[in-house]
Image (tube, rainbow, N blue to C red):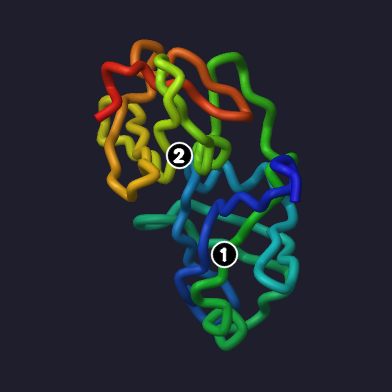
Amino acid sequence: MSRADRPVTLAAIAGAHGVRGEVRLKLFGEGAEALRAFSVFDAGNRRLTLKSVRPANQGAVATFAEITDRSAAEALRGTLLTVPRSALPPLAGGEYYYHDLIGLPCVSTDGLAVGEVVAIDNFGAGDILEIAKPDGKRFMVPMNVRAVPTWNDDGMTIDAAFVE
């Protein structure tokens, strides 16, 4: 599967909301507003057509055309809502989607293989990459120009001073 077609998870159905088939969503993106850019989501082995979505406490509440009652909504608890990577809006220079960085191989500025990106966190001061070394140990580096001077779809370079 090409990188452009890889599914990107935008939300997960957390359970039913009310009796008319609305679902509670756990969001993995920029909020309920971001979901409105998509009309159809892949949901496991089916497709769901978004009718409405609104912000809610710790997530969102959505209505899908194919879910008409509480039982149907409850049956989808835990279902991931995805779109193909190619459906996401284009990025400006220097921007990235976390999804695109996960799995990228990393080399140091000295040319040594370092490992691969396994997670990205943001604790409020910027994105932090978690890199898994070939021996299984992990370390973290900030996603900034000093620590990661170059990156593209094929991999990234980590400044040797940040490699543990």
The single residue placed furthest to the bottom in the displayed view is 71
Q: Which residue is mark 1?
A: 80
97 shown above or below 144: below
- Which of 150 and 72 lies nearest the eye of the viewer? 150
Secondary structure of the residue carrying numbered label 1: strand
152 shown above or below 135: above
Q: Image quadrant for the C terminus?
A: top left
143 shown above or below 31: above
Give percent across and percent down for residue 80: 57, 64
Residue drawn 57% across the image and 42% down it: 34
| Number of other residues with Cα within 10 Å of mark 2, as a class: few under 14, some 14 to 19, many 20 or more | many
Give percent across and percent down for residue 52: 63, 57
Q: Which mark is residue 67?
A: none
Q: Quadrant of residue 69?
A: bottom right
The amino acid type, in three-letter code, at marker 2 is Glu
- Which of 57 and 74 lies nearest the eye of the viewer? 74
Residue drawn 41% across the image and 15% down it: 109
Whole-number angstrom distance, CA of label 2 to CA of label 1:
25 Å
The amino acid type, in three-letter code, at marker 1 is Leu
Secondary structure of the residue carrying numbered label 2: strand
Give percent across and percent down for residue 94: 54, 16
- Mark 2 or 1 closer to N-term? 1
59 shown above or below 89: below
Give percent across and percent down for residue 75: 57, 84
Q: Is residue 61 left or right of residue 49?
A: left
Q: Is residue 103 left or right of residue 118?
A: right
- Which of 118 and 84 lies nearest the eye of the viewer? 118
Residue drawn 42% across the image and 25% down it: 112
Q: Which mark is residue 116?
A: 2
| Viewer-nearest of discs 2 and 1 | 2
